[in-house]
Amino acid sequence: MNDLSEFRADTKAWLHENLPESLIAGGEEYSGGSRETVQNPDTLRWFESCYEQGWTVPTWPREFGGAALESVQAKVLQQEMAMARAPIPLSGMGVTMIGPTLLEHGTDDQRARHLSNIANGKVRWCQGYSEPNAGSDLASLQTRAVDQGDYYLVNGSKIWTSGANFADWIFCLVRTNTEVPKHEGISFVLFSMDDPGVSVKPIILIAGNSPFCQCFFDDVKVSKTDLIGVENRGWTVAKRLLQHERSMISGMGSLGGGGRSMTLAETALSFYGKIGSKIADAPGREAVSKINMDRQAFSLTQRRAVEENTSGSTPTFATSMFKYYATELDTRRMEALMSMRGSAGIGWEGTEFDGNAITDTRSWLFGKAGTIAGGSSEVQLNIIAKRVLGLPD
Ligand SMILES: Cc1cc2nc3c(=O)[nH]c(=O)nc-3n(C[C@H](O)[C@H](O)[C@H](O)COP(=O)(O)OP(=O)(O)OC[C@H]3O[C@@H](n4cnc5c(N)ncnc54)[C@H](O)[C@@H]3O)c2cc1C
């Protein structure tokens, strides 16, 4: 048995021993932080067992709570967790976005102060990028940070800040110079959501549960010890973080995968019936086969990208291709599900719709958000054209 097969066998055995029965295929999301609550105590037990293994942040160095896994081992862990239908032990922007960015761009002091508190679930993070007048054109952001010696005074507002009402800290883009081209006057800072001058207002969303908030900053004092990288060079850090975010959205950076209600094929069989082992309806069968083949091809392409990436870190501009394809494919999958369900596919609440119908309607609506979050599909196509294919502007 080679090392990787041995690691797979050990992981399988560990999961068999430690994954609580009550979480299989139905675990709740756990993002940590001081405001987090859980319905099922097994969620915390599962998180703690994984944390002891270093599996809340499997590829991070051991000194910050990780297991120092190679990326191929982390992929095996992800596959085994998905196969066991285990929930992700710790999700959120700490693990997937600011943590990897600090590993690359933070100072020793910043890494020491922030990384372990992400891995051990003590601190939850949110992302202060978008503003009311800066979304796709993010570099137009206007939140100001004025130099006051050893700190900045921050004033402005961020919007669509997912989970800000549950977050302990924020990573935030601020304008530190207004006299230069817009990309050259941005800095990347961190501060506590409990700091004086920070206020948060939730925003309601069509899909029901809303992750969104608007944040307001009024004379917030931000220590320069939490400036990441160089003042006015925050755009470089910001773009790298977006690559980690896009990687996470496309499923490359996350663990687990349990929890979906029914697969597309299972739903098609229940709606169209079957002839032998086949879905009875020919167009339905074709739609399911096409989407499943595309999903399989995408999954193999992702695996190849992980195996070919010898740096062990998140790829750079290629993340835009994966993010684009993954979210558009998910949208196609949800559209197919909705069309199969017909009038039963618009269940929102009430006893006439079963749980799967309600879950699918909400996932269908929320799936559209995936094509916008972390940069819209159109913006990803622009990046692919310019940075991957080298086409002129
Ligand atoms: C689920 C979700 C979670 C989010 N979480 C966060 C968060 O935590 N923190 C945060 O800061 N932000 C967050 N966002 C905001 C997200 O980053 C922005 O919505 C996104 O960047 C698009 O910006 P916008 O909404 O202002 O749309 P706009 O920029 O106004 O775009 C409107 C439309 O124009 C298109 N468009 C714009 N420019 C171009 C162009 N150059 N070429 C072609 N088409 C273009 C877009 O593709 C889009 O279809 C989240 C968004 C979603 C949906």
Image (cartoon, grey):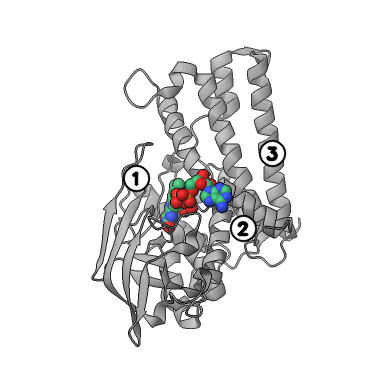
**In the image, is 59 to the left or to the right of 386?**
left
Look at 62% across and 62% down and name the residue there.
Answer: 314
Locate residue 170, reporting x and y percent: 38, 65
**Screen quadrant of the N terminus:** bottom right
Vertical order, 54 against 259 (above or below): below
Locate residue 30, reporting x and y percent: 40, 52
Gap in angstroms between the C-alphas marked 2 and 1? 27 Å
Locate residue 155, reporting x and y percent: 31, 69
**Screen quadrant of the C terminus:** bottom right
Q: Which residue corresponds to mark 2?
A: 74
Q: Secondary structure at mark 1?
A: loop
Vertical order, 362 against 307 (above or below): above
Look at 50% across and 73% down and name the residue there.
Answer: 234
Number of numbered discs overlaid on the protein picture? 3
Gap in angstroms between the C-alphas marked 2 and 3? 19 Å
In the image, what residue type sits under mark 3? Answer: Gln
Q: Which residue corresponds to mark 1?
A: 40
Q: Mark 1 packing: few (<14 Cα in 10 Å), some, or many (20+)? A: few
Gap in angstroms between the C-alphas marked 3 and 1? 33 Å
Q: Quadrant of residue 4?
A: bottom right
In the image, what residue type sits under mark 2? Answer: Ala
Q: Earlier in the sequence, mark 3 or mark 1?
A: 1
Q: Nearer the viewer, mark 2 or mark 1?
A: 2
Q: Which mark is residue 296?
A: 3
Look at 69% across and 67% down and name the residue there.
Answer: 311
Vertical order, 229 against 47 (above or below): below
Which is more toward the observer, 59 or 308?
A: 308
